[in-house]
Amino acid sequence: MEKIKIKVNGNEIEVSPGKTVLQVLKDMGIHVPVLCHYEPLMPQGSCRLCVVEDRGVLKTACTTPVEPNMDIKTDTPNVINSRKLVLQLLFSERNHYCMYCEVTGECELQDLGYEFGLDHFEFPTYERRFPVDNSHEFIMMDHNRCVLCRRCVRACSEVAGHFVLGEMERGIDTMIIADMDVPLGNSSCTSCGLCAQVCPTGAIIDKRSSYLGREVQSEIIYANCDMCPVGCGMEIYKKKGANFIVKIYGDWNSDVSRGLLCKTGRYLSLYDAKERVVGIKLKDEFGYRRLHEDNLINIFKSKLDNAIVYVDGSLFNEEIEMIKEIFKDKVYSLYPNESPIPTNIKLSELDDKEFYVVINADLNREYGAVGSIVKRNVIGKKAKLMVIDKEFNSLAKIADYVFNIKDLNLALDILKKQKEVIIIYKDINEEEKSTLNSLNNAKFLYLPKETNSIGLQKYGIKHEKAKAENVFVFGKNLEGIKDLPLQNSFVVVFTPYEDEILRRADVIVGTTNGFEREGTFYNLEGKILKKEKVLRPDFDVLDLKSFLSNVLGKTEKVS
């Protein structure tokens, strides 16, 4: 495409058509102040801080496309005075008292005040009191600090797809509201937290991270969430020199989730209220007694003959590989892990489709990033949605068609008439599988139950109920132990959490969990993702990967 010529601060340059003035200036390394503009969101030009001059006319750089023969000036007195006036108005409109604000020191409005040398207010301020909404479990909204940039509104709709936040009233009376002006905690908010991540001031904040430390006091660790099989990209802010995480943001550069996170990844991954298994315990006639790791290795070695292993999908690939190396083909999955209909579409290909089908999965409550993709297309771009479930599904309120799973054949009549349908499904039986396989116009995305279910498939580990004299169990989802034939077996369980089911175990080993672990896993589309170790354990627990390495170095392999 032929380039066009423009002038920038007196210098003639050639630029590609289709770019905005702001993009061109950024490419040239010219700083332009912004507040409402945020790169992943559609520009709206509401704050007016990015104004530049084109042949005597002020224009917003973020929304103005480049045109031939433009004469852009970024630092004329007219431009500078306009930006200062806008800042004065922003500071006086609400109550921006920086000293007690949670984000002071990393507030974009505060930074702009310093940049333009504002040392006093030219207009009356602190004249109106605005409400503070503390009703939400994880998020607080302080309207006193809102600058009406609408980043939160746009992120909630354009990216997260929830369409919870909006605006009420006009002009100086404009307020950011949830749903039809209800408290955020009583709204349809799914707690994805993206609004707090994009807010440039202290108007929307994460409660848990409040006053724990500034970003400059944190080291940022990039990893993938292992709380579900999606594997969203994370920016983890860990306090320098301390053993705690300040906050978690979605990673905009992640090729899996592109900034998305759900309630589980952003918040619940930091709240581990379950009782942990501490130490290594051997059952004897008096109960349990503590063991050293060397004793455990000796027991491990002595029980390898006539032994089998059960694992769940919480294990990382490296752990599975070593377990397979030790036990060969005697490794089984605690739970079924086969994909009824294999996935044949990537997460990056889900956008801009015309017809979505969600089967047996409430995407507002699980697999949240997938739900965001579906909702932003259904609500924002008017794609069709069919929900098929055996129980209540909150997606039904935005669906064009709702069917009970028993009526799958009726739904099929509608689906066959579509050009293409995207079927996102979980938990189907053989009959339902056969029915869906009859569609020639469908792409499928399978939602595995466990984080690394696909990894178990890759390593050839299948769900079977086998018997042996010695049974080893590795994992944290132990419900499946109830169905195992463990009578007269010596049972060793490696797990992070206490559970009633552990009463069946002869040896219980506490293992690392969450941000105490590192390793790789396969996400639901088959990508190998990395979970980084961020924290050192606060408990006497075993690192499973290190333990298995020691075993491999000290024992003969099982033939």
Image: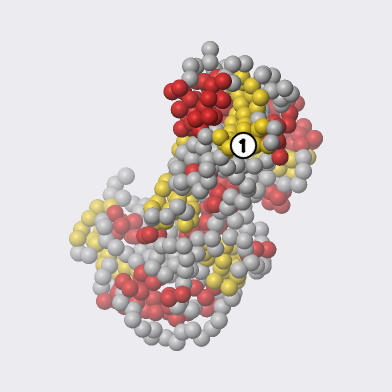
Q: Nearer the viewer, residue 151 or 402?
A: 151
The residue sitting at 54% across, 83% down in the picture is 128
Q: Quadrant of residue 442?
A: top right
Whether residue 475 is visible: no
- Which color mode does the image show? secondary structure
Q: Where is residue 163 in the image (x, y as percent from the top left)?
A: 60, 57
The residue sitting at 49% across, 36% down in the picture is 543
Q: Position of residue 124 (x, y in %)?
A: 45, 87
Q: Nearer the viewer, residue 30 or 111?
A: 111
- Is 139 on the left or on the right of 35, as rendered? right
Q: In this view, does 281 lie above or below 257?
A: above
- Is 430 on the left or on the right of 218, as rendered? right
Q: What element carries label 1?
A: strand
Q: Residue furthest right?
A: 406
Q: Which of 55 and 531 is in front in this view?
A: 531
- Please name the residue that numbered disc 1 is placed on: 289
